[in-house]
Image (spheres, helix red, strand yellow):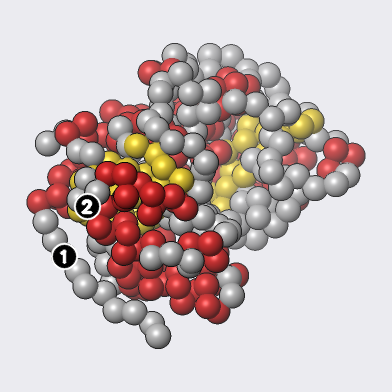
Amino acid sequence: MGLKDYKIAWFTEGGWQGKVSLDNPNMRNDVSTKYILGAEHYPIFQIPQVLQHFGENYFDFGIVTLPKTNTEQLMKFDMMGDLKRLCKKTISMQEGPHWLFQDYTMEQQIWWYNALTEFDMLFAHNLKDVRYYKGLVNKPVHKMPTLMLTERLGIQPRSEWSDAVIIGGNMVRWYGGFDSYMVAQEFDKPIYAPSMGRKIDREDEMDINHFPYMSWVEWINALSQFQYGVHLMPTHAAGTFTLNCAFHGIPCIGYKGLDTQEELHPDLTVDDGDIEKAKYLARELKTGKGFYDEMSQKCRKNYEKSLYNEKNFVPYITKIFNNMYDGFEYHGGHLG
Protein backbone atom coordinates (compact mmCIF):
# COMPACT_ATOMS: atom_id res chain seq x y z
CA MET A 1 0.00 0.00 0.00
CA GLY A 2 1.03 3.61 -0.51
CA LEU A 3 0.88 6.39 2.05
CA LYS A 4 -2.18 7.91 0.37
CA ASP A 5 -4.10 4.67 0.99
CA TYR A 6 -4.08 5.27 4.74
CA LYS A 7 -6.17 7.60 6.86
CA ILE A 8 -3.62 9.30 9.09
CA ALA A 9 -4.32 11.83 11.83
CA TRP A 10 -1.57 13.89 13.45
CA PHE A 11 -2.16 15.63 16.77
CA THR A 12 0.03 18.48 18.07
CA GLU A 13 -0.48 21.53 20.26
CA GLY A 14 -0.91 23.61 17.10
CA GLY A 15 -4.29 25.29 16.94
CA TRP A 16 -5.06 24.55 13.29
CA GLN A 17 -7.00 21.77 11.59
CA GLY A 18 -6.77 20.13 8.16
CA LYS A 19 -4.18 18.94 5.66
CA VAL A 20 -0.99 20.76 4.69
CA SER A 21 -1.03 22.31 1.22
CA LEU A 22 2.07 22.67 -0.91
CA ASP A 23 1.77 26.46 -0.89
CA ASN A 24 2.28 26.57 2.88
CA PRO A 25 5.02 29.21 3.41
CA ASN A 26 6.52 27.34 6.37
CA MET A 27 7.31 23.89 4.99
CA ARG A 28 9.84 23.08 7.69
CA ASN A 29 10.52 19.42 8.40
CA ASP A 30 7.50 18.59 10.59
CA VAL A 31 5.10 20.34 8.22
CA SER A 32 6.69 18.65 5.20
CA THR A 33 6.29 15.26 6.85
CA LYS A 34 2.59 15.86 7.42
CA TYR A 35 2.27 16.83 3.77
CA ILE A 36 4.03 13.69 2.48
CA LEU A 37 1.94 11.45 4.75
CA GLY A 38 -1.27 13.18 3.70
CA ALA A 39 -2.10 13.49 7.39
CA GLU A 40 -5.06 15.37 8.81
CA HIS A 41 -3.87 17.65 11.58
CA TYR A 42 -5.90 18.32 14.73
CA PRO A 43 -5.10 20.11 18.01
CA ILE A 44 -4.09 17.53 20.58
CA PHE A 45 -6.44 18.98 23.19
CA GLN A 46 -9.41 18.26 20.90
CA ILE A 47 -8.92 14.48 20.66
CA PRO A 48 -12.22 13.83 22.54
CA GLN A 49 -14.13 16.06 20.11
CA VAL A 50 -12.50 14.41 17.08
CA LEU A 51 -13.50 10.98 18.46
CA GLN A 52 -17.06 12.17 19.00
CA HIS A 53 -17.20 13.51 15.44
CA PHE A 54 -15.73 10.53 13.55
CA GLY A 55 -16.38 7.59 15.85
CA GLU A 56 -14.19 4.60 16.70
CA ASN A 57 -11.46 3.21 14.41
CA TYR A 58 -11.92 5.98 11.86
CA PHE A 59 -8.19 6.56 11.32
CA ASP A 60 -5.69 3.85 10.42
CA PHE A 61 -2.91 5.68 12.24
CA GLY A 62 -2.89 8.38 14.89
CA ILE A 63 0.41 10.21 15.42
CA VAL A 64 0.83 12.33 18.54
CA THR A 65 3.52 14.92 19.17
CA LEU A 66 3.39 15.43 22.92
CA PRO A 67 3.99 19.14 23.61
CA LYS A 68 7.00 20.43 25.51
CA THR A 69 4.64 22.32 27.86
CA ASN A 70 0.96 22.21 28.91
CA THR A 71 1.23 18.56 29.96
CA GLU A 72 -1.17 19.26 32.82
CA GLN A 73 -3.93 20.01 30.31
CA LEU A 74 -3.52 16.57 28.73
CA MET A 75 -3.86 14.98 32.15
CA LYS A 76 -7.40 16.32 32.46
CA PHE A 77 -8.87 13.76 30.03
CA ASP A 78 -8.24 10.17 28.95
CA MET A 79 -6.01 11.10 26.05
CA MET A 80 -4.69 7.63 25.30
CA GLY A 81 -8.04 5.94 25.80
CA ASP A 82 -9.75 8.30 23.37
CA LEU A 83 -6.85 8.08 20.91
CA LYS A 84 -6.92 4.29 20.86
CA ARG A 85 -10.66 4.29 20.21
CA LEU A 86 -10.26 6.79 17.39
CA CYS A 87 -7.21 5.22 15.67
CA LYS A 88 -6.40 1.59 14.85
CA LYS A 89 -2.68 2.15 15.48
CA THR A 90 -1.10 4.87 17.61
CA ILE A 91 2.36 6.41 17.26
CA SER A 92 4.31 8.87 19.41
CA MET A 93 6.54 11.42 17.64
CA GLN A 94 9.48 12.76 19.64
CA GLU A 95 9.43 16.50 20.37
CA GLY A 96 12.69 18.07 21.51
CA PRO A 97 15.55 16.22 23.26
CA HIS A 98 14.66 12.89 24.86
CA TRP A 99 15.51 14.13 28.35
CA LEU A 100 13.12 17.08 28.27
CA PHE A 101 10.31 15.34 30.20
CA GLN A 102 12.62 15.10 33.23
CA ASP A 103 12.15 18.84 33.74
CA TYR A 104 8.44 18.18 34.47
CA THR A 105 6.89 17.67 37.89
CA MET A 106 7.03 14.11 39.23
CA GLU A 107 3.34 13.62 38.51
CA GLN A 108 3.79 14.81 34.93
CA GLN A 109 6.83 12.59 34.40
CA ILE A 110 4.86 9.49 35.48
CA TRP A 111 1.94 10.49 33.24
CA TRP A 112 4.29 11.05 30.29
CA TYR A 113 5.98 7.68 30.77
CA ASN A 114 2.69 5.81 31.11
CA ALA A 115 1.40 7.48 27.96
CA LEU A 116 4.47 6.28 26.02
CA THR A 117 3.89 2.69 27.14
CA GLU A 118 0.43 2.74 25.52
CA PHE A 119 1.53 3.76 22.02
CA ASP A 120 1.94 0.97 19.49
CA MET A 121 5.15 2.49 18.15
CA LEU A 122 7.45 5.48 18.64
CA PHE A 123 9.28 7.72 16.18
CA ALA A 124 12.56 9.34 17.29
CA HIS A 125 14.92 11.91 15.78
CA ASN A 126 18.33 10.29 16.15
CA LEU A 127 19.75 6.79 16.56
CA LYS A 128 20.73 7.58 20.15
CA ASP A 129 17.10 8.59 20.77
CA VAL A 130 15.95 5.28 19.25
CA ARG A 131 18.15 3.40 21.71
CA TYR A 132 16.92 5.57 24.59
CA TYR A 133 13.23 4.97 23.95
CA LYS A 134 13.70 1.25 23.25
CA GLY A 135 15.35 0.91 26.62
CA LEU A 136 12.82 3.12 28.37
CA VAL A 137 9.57 1.54 27.24
CA ASN A 138 10.55 -1.64 25.35
CA LYS A 139 8.48 -0.70 22.31
CA PRO A 140 9.15 -0.71 18.56
CA VAL A 141 11.00 2.52 17.84
CA HIS A 142 12.01 3.82 14.42
CA LYS A 143 14.01 6.81 13.33
CA MET A 144 11.93 9.55 11.71
CA PRO A 145 14.37 11.24 9.33
CA THR A 146 14.20 15.03 9.28
CA LEU A 147 12.55 15.56 5.90
CA MET A 148 13.52 18.46 3.63
CA LEU A 149 11.26 19.19 0.66
CA THR A 150 12.98 21.12 -2.12
CA GLU A 151 12.10 20.15 -5.70
CA ARG A 152 8.35 20.42 -5.10
CA LEU A 153 8.92 23.96 -3.80
CA GLY A 154 11.26 25.04 -6.59
CA ILE A 155 14.24 25.34 -4.23
CA GLN A 156 17.67 24.83 -5.79
CA PRO A 157 21.04 24.32 -4.06
CA ARG A 158 23.36 27.31 -4.10
CA SER A 159 25.47 28.14 -7.13
CA GLU A 160 27.28 31.16 -5.64
CA TRP A 161 27.74 32.62 -2.19
CA SER A 162 29.15 35.50 -0.20
CA ASP A 163 32.21 35.46 2.03
CA ALA A 164 30.41 35.08 5.38
CA VAL A 165 29.64 32.57 8.15
CA ILE A 166 26.32 31.71 9.78
CA ILE A 167 25.76 30.18 13.22
CA GLY A 168 22.69 28.09 13.89
CA GLY A 169 21.16 29.62 17.00
CA ASN A 170 21.01 32.29 19.66
CA MET A 171 23.06 32.96 22.80
CA VAL A 172 21.35 30.43 25.08
CA ARG A 173 22.37 26.99 26.34
CA TRP A 174 19.67 25.29 24.25
CA TYR A 175 21.34 26.38 20.99
CA GLY A 176 24.94 26.69 22.19
CA GLY A 177 25.15 30.03 20.43
CA PHE A 178 28.14 31.28 22.40
CA ASP A 179 30.19 28.21 21.48
CA SER A 180 29.27 28.67 17.83
CA TYR A 181 30.11 32.37 17.97
CA MET A 182 33.57 31.73 19.42
CA VAL A 183 34.37 29.24 16.66
CA ALA A 184 32.86 31.42 13.93
CA GLN A 185 35.31 34.19 14.83
CA GLU A 186 38.12 31.99 13.50
CA PHE A 187 36.95 32.66 9.95
CA ASP A 188 37.43 36.43 10.40
CA LYS A 189 34.31 36.96 8.30
CA PRO A 190 30.96 38.68 8.97
CA ILE A 191 28.86 36.50 11.30
CA TYR A 192 25.12 36.02 10.86
CA ALA A 193 22.45 34.21 12.87
CA PRO A 194 18.72 33.55 12.54
CA SER A 195 16.30 35.12 15.01
CA MET A 196 14.92 32.27 17.10
CA GLY A 197 12.30 32.16 19.84
CA ARG A 198 14.98 32.04 22.53
CA LYS A 199 16.80 35.23 21.49
CA ILE A 200 17.83 37.10 24.64
CA ASP A 201 18.12 40.76 25.62
CA ARG A 202 21.17 42.66 24.35
CA GLU A 203 22.09 39.89 21.92
CA ASP A 204 21.84 42.50 19.17
CA GLU A 205 24.83 44.27 20.74
CA MET A 206 27.12 41.40 19.69
CA ASP A 207 28.91 41.73 16.36
CA ILE A 208 26.35 39.37 14.83
CA ASN A 209 23.96 40.24 12.03
CA HIS A 210 20.54 38.82 12.89
CA PHE A 211 18.09 37.86 10.21
CA PRO A 212 14.50 38.92 10.85
CA TYR A 213 11.87 36.23 11.31
CA MET A 214 11.03 34.79 7.91
CA SER A 215 9.18 31.94 6.23
CA TRP A 216 10.92 28.62 5.71
CA VAL A 217 11.37 29.12 1.96
CA GLU A 218 12.80 32.60 2.59
CA TRP A 219 15.17 31.11 5.17
CA ILE A 220 16.46 28.38 2.84
CA ASN A 221 17.11 30.93 0.11
CA ALA A 222 18.87 33.28 2.55
CA LEU A 223 21.02 30.43 3.89
CA SER A 224 22.27 29.66 0.39
CA GLN A 225 24.41 32.81 0.44
CA PHE A 226 26.82 31.62 3.14
CA GLN A 227 30.23 30.02 2.80
CA TYR A 228 30.54 28.46 6.26
CA GLY A 229 28.20 27.10 8.94
CA VAL A 230 28.78 26.52 12.66
CA HIS A 231 26.17 24.91 14.90
CA LEU A 232 27.60 23.65 18.19
CA MET A 233 24.17 22.90 19.65
CA PRO A 234 24.26 20.59 22.69
CA THR A 235 20.49 19.99 22.53
CA HIS A 236 19.97 17.18 20.05
CA ALA A 237 16.64 16.93 18.26
CA ALA A 238 15.66 17.22 14.57
CA GLY A 239 18.93 18.77 13.35
CA THR A 240 17.44 20.99 10.66
CA PHE A 241 20.23 23.58 10.48
CA THR A 242 23.01 21.14 9.62
CA LEU A 243 20.66 19.42 7.17
CA ASN A 244 19.81 22.68 5.42
CA CYS A 245 23.52 23.51 5.18
CA ALA A 246 24.28 20.13 3.59
CA PHE A 247 21.58 20.65 0.95
CA HIS A 248 23.39 23.80 -0.14
CA GLY A 249 26.86 22.25 0.13
CA ILE A 250 27.77 24.51 3.07
CA PRO A 251 30.34 22.80 5.34
CA CYS A 252 29.03 22.92 8.92
CA ILE A 253 30.97 22.31 12.13
CA GLY A 254 28.87 20.70 14.85
CA TYR A 255 28.70 18.39 17.87
CA LYS A 256 28.29 14.61 17.87
CA GLY A 257 24.96 13.05 18.79
CA LEU A 258 22.96 14.68 16.03
CA ASP A 259 22.40 12.33 13.10
CA THR A 260 22.19 15.06 10.47
CA GLN A 261 25.57 16.36 11.62
CA GLU A 262 27.30 12.99 11.87
CA GLU A 263 25.90 11.61 8.61
CA LEU A 264 26.15 14.72 6.45
CA HIS A 265 29.27 16.44 7.88
CA PRO A 266 31.21 13.54 9.45
CA ASP A 267 34.65 15.14 9.09
CA LEU A 268 33.45 18.36 10.72
CA THR A 269 31.88 16.70 13.76
CA VAL A 270 33.49 17.12 17.19
CA ASP A 271 32.83 15.87 20.71
CA ASP A 272 30.57 18.00 22.90
CA GLY A 273 32.59 20.88 24.27
CA ASP A 274 35.65 20.33 22.05
CA ILE A 275 35.99 23.97 21.04
CA GLU A 276 39.69 23.48 20.40
CA LYS A 277 39.10 20.98 17.59
CA ALA A 278 36.17 23.00 16.25
CA LYS A 279 38.42 26.05 15.94
CA TYR A 280 41.08 23.94 14.22
CA LEU A 281 38.52 22.75 11.66
CA ALA A 282 37.39 26.33 11.08
CA ARG A 283 40.97 27.37 10.30
CA GLU A 284 41.35 24.38 7.95
CA LEU A 285 38.19 25.33 6.07
CA LYS A 286 39.36 28.94 5.83
CA THR A 287 42.92 28.33 4.66
CA GLY A 288 42.69 25.01 2.82
CA LYS A 289 40.89 25.51 -0.49
CA GLY A 290 41.12 21.81 -1.26
CA PHE A 291 39.74 20.88 2.14
CA TYR A 292 36.85 23.32 1.81
CA ASP A 293 35.90 22.05 -1.64
CA GLU A 294 36.08 18.44 -0.45
CA MET A 295 33.82 19.13 2.54
CA SER A 296 31.36 21.12 0.43
CA GLN A 297 31.04 18.39 -2.20
CA LYS A 298 30.91 15.63 0.40
CA CYS A 299 28.05 17.06 2.46
CA ARG A 300 26.03 17.68 -0.69
CA LYS A 301 26.58 14.10 -1.89
CA ASN A 302 25.76 12.77 1.58
CA TYR A 303 22.47 14.66 1.47
CA GLU A 304 21.58 13.18 -1.93
CA LYS A 305 21.97 9.60 -0.69
CA SER A 306 20.42 10.19 2.75
CA LEU A 307 16.91 9.56 4.06
CA TYR A 308 16.45 13.31 4.53
CA ASN A 309 15.38 13.98 0.95
CA GLU A 310 12.01 12.98 -0.46
CA LYS A 311 13.15 10.34 -2.97
CA ASN A 312 14.67 8.21 -0.20
CA PHE A 313 12.34 9.21 2.63
CA VAL A 314 9.10 8.06 0.98
CA PRO A 315 10.00 4.37 0.41
CA TYR A 316 11.59 4.20 3.88
CA ILE A 317 8.58 5.57 5.74
CA THR A 318 6.09 3.70 3.56
CA LYS A 319 7.69 0.38 4.51
CA ILE A 320 7.38 1.24 8.22
CA PHE A 321 3.68 2.07 7.91
CA ASN A 322 2.97 -1.01 5.79
CA ASN A 323 4.70 -3.31 8.27
CA MET A 324 2.85 -1.72 11.15
CA TYR A 325 -0.49 -1.98 9.40
CA ASP A 326 0.10 -5.69 8.79
CA GLY A 327 -0.09 -6.07 12.51
CA PHE A 328 1.69 -6.23 15.79
CA GLU A 329 0.52 -5.69 19.32
CA TYR A 330 2.40 -4.90 22.48
CA HIS A 331 0.96 -4.50 25.93
CA GLY A 332 3.28 -2.38 28.03
CA GLY A 333 3.28 -1.75 31.74
CA HIS A 334 2.48 1.35 33.77
CA LEU A 335 4.17 3.04 36.67
CA GLY A 336 1.93 3.59 39.66
Of 296 and 88, nearer the camera is 88
The label nearer to you, 1 versus 2, is 2
Q: Quadrant of residue 118?
A: bottom left
Q: Tell me the tag on residue 56.
A: 2
Q: Are the residues tagged 1 and 2 within 8 Å (C-beta)? A: no
Q: Which amino acid is tagged 1?
A: Glu
How far separated are the C-alphas under marks 1 and 2? 18 Å
Q: Does residue 84 sit above or below 44 in this rendering?
A: below
Counting other residues with Cα less than 10 Å from the Cα at mark 2, is it few (<14), some (14-19), or many (20 or more)? Answer: some
If the image is split into quadrants, where does the N terminus sit? top left
Q: Does residue 242 sit above or below 225 in this rendering?
A: below
Left or right, 327 with respect to 106, comes to: left
Of 225 and 144, nearer the camera is 144
Q: Does residue 52 sit above or below 222 in this rendering?
A: below
Residue 312 can be seen, yes or no: no
Please state the horizontal and vertical placement of residue 204, each as a whole percent of the image.
85, 38
Please state the horizontal and vertical placement of residue 19, each as a whole percent of the image.
38, 31
The extreme front residue here reads 52
In the image, what residue occupies the spot 52% across and 72% down? 108
Of 255 and 21, nearer the camera is 21
Q: Tell me the tag on residue 329.
A: 1
Please state the horizontal and vertical placement of residue 159, each as a whole percent of the image.
53, 14
Q: Does residue 25 sit above or below 245 in this rendering?
A: above
In the image, what residue occupies the spot 49% across and 33% down? 28
Please state the horizontal and vertical placement of residue 88, each as a whole percent of the image.
20, 53
